[in-house]
Amino acid sequence: MNTTAPSAPTACLALADGTLFYGAGFGATGQVVAELCFNTAMTGYQEIMTDPSYAGQVVTFTFPHIGNTGVNPEDDETGDPVASGMVVKWMPTDPSNWRATEGLSTWLAARGRIAIGGVDTRRLTRAIRQAGAPHVALAHDPDGIFDTDALVAAARGFAGLEGMDLAKEVTCAQSYRWNEMRWAWPEGYSPQTDPKYKVVAIDYGAKRNILRCLASAGCDVTVLPATATADEVMAHEPDGVFLSNGPGDPAATGAYAVPMIKDVLAHDLPVFGICLGHQMLALALGAKTIKMNHGHHGANHPVKDLETGKVEITSMNHGFAVDAQTLPDGVEETHTSLFDGSNCGIRVTGKPVYSVQYHPEASPGPQDSYYLFERFAAAMDAQRA
């Protein structure tokens, strides 16, 4: 594919404030409205697009070489792209990687996702940082015909993510078992054949690599839908309970998730949460969550472990955060962001109950945060003893 945009634009990104960005469309045609965020990762665009946590969002990639390694089925975090669309600086080139099975544009088109290239992503990113994550309408028309007034109106009409429960839209329809472990050379993915722990994972939008990390830590994983009750969780007689990542407003999802988590906590089981699961646990413990200006999205976020003093390079994807000022007695802050001081981890004093805001499975460090899965396994060992 040609790396330059055509002289006549075939795509338009309209912000709710009336700002327009023109470029070259690729992927699917049509129009979508969403919240716009930016991601600073240099790799992993396929994992980002298939991460259920990006539901309701169009992603601006600050790194210009998006699409250069193509896509392949092994890197999907869920069955199909969940992010509403993408914005890039340069048009994707033909893929150059031995693992690629098809090009990014073809992959997006087959899965109904719109993309725009040739955009000044630096200018767009600065706008997001200064004014917050905007509501946008993204349109792709090969004929280059756009009703810009209608696009701006559509962006202004987007309800936004506050108050929106998106976990129900991305969760599994029914329970299932997971035994695939992390990718390793040269075997690739292999099954867990000798699990030591029974873990129930609540799917608020779970990434496959999180489930692989649990399996690699010795877990026999049963995944339940986001709306599972405590009785349904405990019916599996788990050694531990995992709360997954996911999209949307945690307070909205908490309407049904928090009562379940409170009941599970009464059984004194080890509980581990990531991202939205971290926020769900915090709400269940009595804390509150807040909407961030533009959120944290990238694979280069430094987080400090307050217990050890170590700094981990982490992957993040969240537009809401736990308000550390609302943590109740008996709940400790364990990790903080070195970018803005926001909360990135909690634990219950004296109990094997903890969670983190970032993604330890995403390997940005690359192994800085994998100890969290080992800690979960150790907690289940100790609970048995």
Image (cartoon, rainbow, N blue to C red):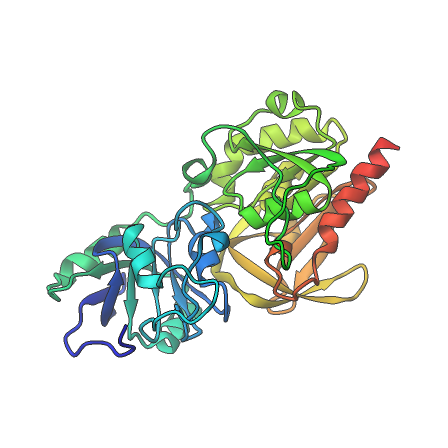
As drawn, 28 above or below 230: below
Q: Residue at x 42, y 42 (%)?
A: 163
**Residue most toward the right?**
385
Q: Is residue 274 visible?
A: no
Q: In this figure, what is the number of numbered marks?
A: 0
Q: Give percent across and percent down for residue 168.
A: 44, 35
Q: Nearer the viewer, residue 166 or 289?
A: 166
Q: Quadrant of residue 376?
A: top right
Q: Give percent across and percent down for residue 179.
A: 62, 39
Q: Give percent across and percent down for residue 250.
A: 51, 43
Q: Nearer the viewer, residue 71 or 56?
A: 71
Q: Taking 239 as reference, is 4 left or right?
A: left
Quadrant the N terminus occupies:
bottom left
Q: Residue at x 13, y 63 (%)?
A: 146
Quadrant the C terminus occupies:
top right
Q: Quadrant of residue 92?
A: bottom left
As drawn, 230 above or below 58: above
Q: Quadrant of residue 68?
A: bottom left
Q: Taking 185 as reference, is 37 left or right?
A: left
Q: Nearer the viewer, residue 236 or 137?
A: 236
Q: Nearer the viewer, residue 246 or 114?
A: 114
